[in-house]
Amino acid sequence: MSLKTVLGKAWKIWRTKLQPLAILVLSLTSFRSAVADWNDVPTGSMKPTIVEGDRIFVNKLAYGLKVPFTTIHLAHWNTPQRGEIVVFNSPSDGTRLVKRVVGLPGDTVLMVNDQLYINGQALSYQVANGSITETLGQRKHEMMVIPTVRAMRTFGPVKIPTGEYFMMGDNRDNSADSRYFGTVKLDQIVGRSSAVALSVDYDRHYLPRWDRFFKALD
């Protein structure tokens, strides 16, 4: 068989079978990279809002459009708002994290004994039936404190630079967040999450938690 024949057959296989598959894979991965994706949550740093085993939706178009597979923005049309849950790359090591936006650019954030102050104003907290509800901007959400755990319960004041955000986990005493690695730049934010896609229970052989499927996140 001649080289020309071999190359001809190889080209035909590429054009009729491999090329359509490659285009499909590239389209799907580009969509997940720039438009929408899901993110596994392996830790309890956002409890009780998000628990271990949740897989959350990530809207990557919430704040702008990026070049697929990069952090380069082609356009910005919105910015994170106080209280929103966002997915971002940690400034310290690039690890993908899920936290809540606490401080906006220009804010001054202070915490004293787990009490947050933003621009000198103390946040409102309500305690009922063993749960704590924090009012953060226009949003109310449940949070956790674990007094027996060693944690940074007092810090600041921290002045947030232009274009950066202060992130914290809802599980305040068990969260590696901006208290430890600093503020997060807008280009490091992957997207916003507002719902759980699905959830499995790690302690029960990965059985589905049906009540958490498509659960809205406060």
Image (cartoon, helix red, strand yellow):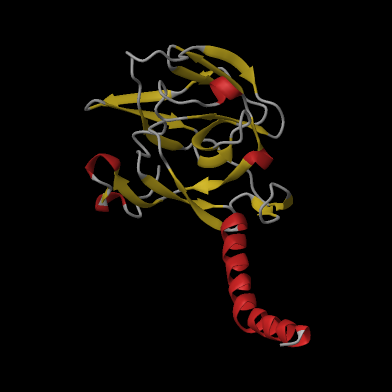
Quarter placement of the N terminus: bottom right
- Give the image quarter of residue 146: top left
Q: Is residue 69 above or below residue 127?
A: below
Residue found farthest to the front = 1
Residue 190, by quadrant, is: top right
For this rendering, which residue is in front, 177 or 27?
27
Looking at the image, residue 118 lies above or below residue 84: above
Q: Is residue 89 above or below residue 194?
A: above
Horizontal side of residue 75 vs 39, given as left or right: right
Q: Position of residue 203 (x, y in %)?
A: 25, 39
Q: Position of residue 213 (x, y in %)?
A: 32, 54
Q: Nearer the viewer, residue 123 or 14?
A: 14
Q: Image point 33% across, 14% down: which residue?
A: 147
- The percent position of residue 101, horizontal first and vertical second, equals 53, 34
Q: Quadrant of residue 187?
A: top right
Viewed as shown, does residue 47 lie left or right of 4? left
Q: Residue at x 66, y 79 (%)?
A: 14
Query: Is residue 205 toward the left or the right of residue 101 in the image?
Result: left
**Mark count:** 0
> Which x, y percent locates residue 106?
67, 27
| Residue 61 visible in this rendered orientation of the protein | no
